[in-house]
Image: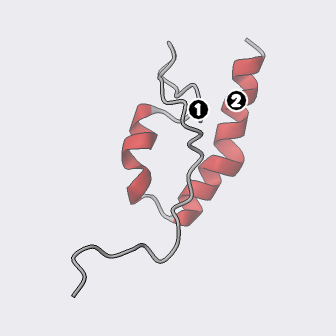
């Protein structure tokens, strides 16, 4: 009997390994808030995709225009 179970598929994540919060409270790498990062494992794939495809790119674009 296995003690640890391997996930059936990898979790969707925008993480790029640059994990620092900026002055606005957004991760410098993926643009998620600390709350989104903390709750990421509780989100459904649909919620993750919504963030990754809709919200995070807008935040990234806004950061480049400041």
Choose top left, top right, bottom left or bottom right for residue 30: top right
Q: Could you tell me which quadrant the N terminus lies in?
A: bottom left
The residue lying toward the viewer, choosing from 10 and 30, is 10
Q: Left or right? Give the position of 31 relative to 41.
A: right
Where is residue 48? Give x, y as percent: 56, 55
Earlier residue among tags 1 and 2: 1
User: Which residue corresponds to the image point at 42% horizontal and 73% vertical from the top-left?
Assistant: 7
Q: Give the distance between the C-alpha atoms of the residues marked 1 and 2, in whole angstroms.
A: 6 Å
**Pointer 1 local density, CA inside 10 Å: few below 14, some 14–19, many at least 20:** many
| Residue picked out by circle 2 | 60
Q: How many marks?
A: 2
Please say if 21 is above or below 30.
above
- Where 17 falls versus 12 (above or below)? above
Q: Nearer the viewer, residue 2 or 58?
A: 2
Q: Is residue 9 above or below residue 26?
A: below
Determine whether 21 is above or below 6 in the image. Answer: above
Q: Measured from the top left, where is residue 46 in percent x and y?
A: 58, 64
Q: How crowded is mark 2: few (under 14 residues within 10 Å), some or many (20 or more)?
A: some
Q: Which dot marks residue 31?
A: 1
Left or right, 4 with respect to 28, comes to left
Residue at 39 percent across and 74 percent down: it is 6
Mark 2 secondary-structure assignment: helix
Answer with left or right where residue 17 lies relative to residue 66. left
What colour scheme has been applied to the protein in the rendered image? secondary structure
Query: Which of 9 and 43 lies nearest the eye of the viewer?
Result: 9
Q: Residue at x 60, y 46 (%)?
A: 14
Q: Is mark 1 on a helix, strand or loop?
A: loop
Residue 53 numbered tag: none
Residue 66 at what x, y percent from top left?
73, 11
Residues under numbered marks 1 and 2 in contact, where contact means CB atoms less than 8 Å apart: yes
| x and y, in percent, of residue 62 in the image | 72, 23
């Amino acid at each position: 009997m296995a003690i640890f179970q391997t996930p059936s598929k990898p979790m969707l994540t925008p993480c790029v390994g640059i994990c620092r919060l900026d002055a606005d409270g957004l991760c410098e790498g993926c643009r998620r808030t600390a709350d989104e990062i903390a709750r990421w494992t509780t989100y459904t794939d649909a919620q993750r995709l919504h963030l990754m495809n809709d919200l995070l790119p807008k935040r990234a674009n806004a950061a480049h225009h400041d």
